Amino acid sequence: MVNFEYQTPTRLMFGRDAIKKLPAVMERFGKRVLLSYGGGSIKRTGLYAKVKELLPDYEITELSGIQPNPKYDPSVLDGVRLCKEKQIEVILAVGGGSVLDCSKAIAAGACYDGEPWDLISGKVKAKAALPIVDIITLAATGSEYDCGGVISRTETNDKIGYMDALLFPAVSILDPVYTFTVSRRQTAAGTADAMNHVMEQYFTGESTLLNDGFMEATLKSLMVNVRKALENPEDYNARAELMLDCTYGCNGILSLGSSYSGWPCHGMEHALSAYYDITHGEGLAIITPRWMKHILSEKTVERFVKYGVNVFGIDPGLGKFEIAERAIQATYDFFASIGIPMHLKELGIDEGRIDEMARHVAENEGLEYAWAPLRQRDIADIFRASL
Ligand code: NZQ
Ligand code: ZN
């Protein structure tokens, strides 16, 4: 087991009607609030009206229209400008991972005098950030329980993930009822995203029994509950389990003490989203089985055997490569079965920019994944196999 330090300062408030605690939560932070949200789902679900009703005495400035794969310009820049102009004291992010990620970048940018991109690109380390409270409405990223954010800059085809301990939300309110309205497509994509978060940690050189069990159970819970949620979008227990699975996925708790191997599928997917603005979870679902096939070798096969036997119940008496190949096929089949388009062409991506994207990944993401290193040529091959 390797050494680690771990702290997640975020308070989770989970469950039906958790939003009733919002006034008490907000009292701690001051009256000047930036309310950030996306393209309007929170208005259609009544959540926007509820927030306004619960915070009658607050000075609320709004930043709306934050897009999926949130953009530096205009959303981050507008948010930072508003925070400075209105002397905002706390950001209330209401929506999916994109709204929350954008709000994290704004929280740091608002306390910085230079160009906010310096912080996102890692050129400068933030010294302070505004506190963030969020009400998460989509089970997927785990942004509500981690200190990372992912921001896209269209003109340079960059989609950069950055982390800073200052950016843990102070409080995350999670009411599964607010996810009842998430579309079939986003429900499936969010599940695929969370499954890949687990897999990026599972497929590593050295893990522990505890971590493996935790991750295998999380994968199984995601697969069982997404089917229930797709069948009945208002199945509270299914939505609740999905939500908590996703919350655990990304903040490192699943791999404490394991050796770190990197997040190769995320590195590749971020290029696809940056160039083609696709849905993150769909890009991951397409790439993951192709990546698995590409890296299957004598060195990696035992992890795939463990995965195949414990997650998919494949007969442990079969040969190890047979188990591994069946496990990879089962991964593909599962994503297909929940309605995810499993070819990049279906998302409008063709051969045209594959080499350019592979170069972009190699130059920007770093590919020294200890367990299964990739070169630029491998990335291009994985993209081609995903077409
Ligand atoms: O914009 P609105 O109108 O709110 O609609 C959104 C959006 O169109 C809609 N939606 C959200 N909640 C809803 C709802 N529709 C109906 N009912 C609801 N309750 O869903 C659409 C997608 O929303 P988005 O926030 O983009 O989805 P998600 O939560 O999957 O976030 C994806 C972003 O997070 C990044 C991804 O790269 C991507 O940019 N990630 C962030 C991570 C992190 N911070 O730790 C880790 C992840 O690996 C990921 O990279
Ligand atoms: Zn992800």
Image: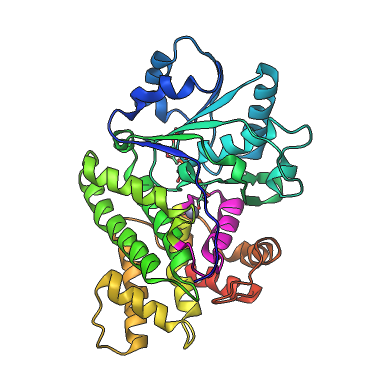
Residue 223 seen in render: yes
Query: Residue 360's x, y, as percent?
Result: 68, 62
Asked if 117 appears above or below 75 in the picture, the reply is below
Labels in figure, total: 0
Q: Position of residue 224 (x, y in %)?
A: 24, 57
Q: Is residue 297 left or right of residue 338?
A: right
Residue 110: quadrant of the picture: top right
In the image, taking residue 210 as reference, residue 379 lies left or right, namely: right
Q: Residue 61: where, in percent of width, then height?
A: 57, 18
Above/below status of 39 relative to 363: above
Q: Residue at x 69, y 25 (%)?
A: 81
User: Can residue 46 be seen in this snapshot?
Assistant: no
Residue, x 33% and y 61% (percent of image)? 219
Quadrant in which residue 338 is drawn = bottom left
* Part of the protein shown in magenta: 255-280
Residue situated in front as seen by the camera: 102 or 269: 102
Identify whether 227 is placed above or below 297.
Answer: above
| Residue name at image x 71 percent, y 39 percent | 127
Residue 278 is one of the magenta-drawn residues? yes
Does residue 41 appear to the left or right of 238 in the view shown? Answer: right
* Relative vertical location of residue 21 with respect to residue 227 in this rendering, above or below: above
Where is residue 342, by image quadrant?
Answer: bottom left
Residue 64 screen position, x and y as percent: 53, 26
* Membership of 258 in magenta stretch: yes
Residue placed at 75% from the left, 43% from the top?
Answer: 118
Closest to the observer, 197 or 255? 255
